[in-house]
Amino acid sequence: MGSSDKLFNRQRSLHQILGGSFVADVVLWRQKDVTVGILVGTLFAWVVFEISGYTLLSLVSSVFFLLFTILFLWAKSAAILNRPAPPLPHLYLSEEMVNQAACFIRSHINMLLSVSENIALGKDTDMFVKVSGGLLLISVLGSLTDFLTLGYTSLVIVLTVPALYEKYEDRVDTYVLMAYRKLRQLHYKFDAVCVSKVPRFNLEEKKLS
């Protein structure tokens, strides 16, 4: 399948478009254990939130309270009974890790600010349409469901749709391009039959007046 037969005439694979990193491997199910773990973990969290009525803050506080209590009592009893302490790693953030995280966050924030500036100044119409459509879609979906369900559903879509598309890429591209060409033909016909007659109609009205 040539690049002209692919969506957007792209020449790179979907894995390369997604960055070609560990995240792309997870999204495309090349790290199946990690992907399944994320889906199962988020499903469990969603069920806990929905059934128990916990909020995120209350659940996190309860989990940390239980964890710290167990570790504290374990350490105290181990000191009294001459047993080994809890096997905890050294909790420490190196300066290199902090700098890498800061650079990553700064680059993405600057990219977001640059896109926002271009939209606000009217320099990027296509991006304005995409962002507006995305925000409108989020607004509509947000009015239909709660944030937790929306987040879980979005995660499921992110972890399933790209993998399915990669598996059936040739078929999807073929049918989507066929539909796009049909819609473009209909657009040309509509333009020739309806839109092109609008100026003539106005001219006829002027002549009659």
Image (spheres, rainbow, N blue to C red):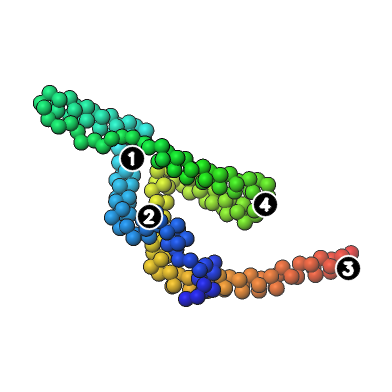
**Residue receiving disc 4:** 123
Give the amino acid type for the residue marked by disc 3 in the picture: Lys
Q: Nearer the viewer, mark 4 or mark 1?
A: 4
Give the amino acid type for the residue marked by disc 1 in the picture: Phe
- Name which of mark 4 and mark 3 comes first in the sequence: 4
**Residue receiving disc 1:** 49
Work out how far the residue at label 4 is from the one at label 1, CA to CA, in angstroms. 43 Å
**Residue receiving disc 3:** 207
**Spot occupied by residue 160 in the image (x, y as percentages of width and height):** 38, 59
Instruction: Please say if the residues under marks 4 and 1 sit with CB atoms less than 8 Å apart.
Output: no
Q: Residues within 10 Å of mark 1 (few under 14, many from 20)?
A: some
Q: Nearer the viewer, mark 4 or mark 2?
A: 2
Q: In percent of the image, x 43 and y 69: which residue is there? A: 169
**Residue receiving disc 2:** 22
Q: Nearer the viewer, mark 2 or mark 3?
A: 2
Most extreme residue toward the left is: 81
Please, what secondary structure does the residue beneath circle 4 have?
loop
Work out how far the residue at label 4 is from the one at label 3, CA to CA, in angstroms. 41 Å
Q: Is residue 140 something that shows in the picture? A: no
Q: In percent of the image, x 54 and y 69: which residue is there? A: 9
Give the amino acid type for the residue marked by disc 2 in the picture: Phe
- Name which of mark 1 and mark 3 comes first in the sequence: 1
**Spot occupied by residue 30 in the image (x, y as percentages of width and height):** 34, 60
**Spot occupied by residue 179 in the image (x, y as percentages of width and height):** 53, 71
From this view, report whether residue 9 is shown above or below residue 145: below
- Quarter of the image containing the C terminus? bottom right
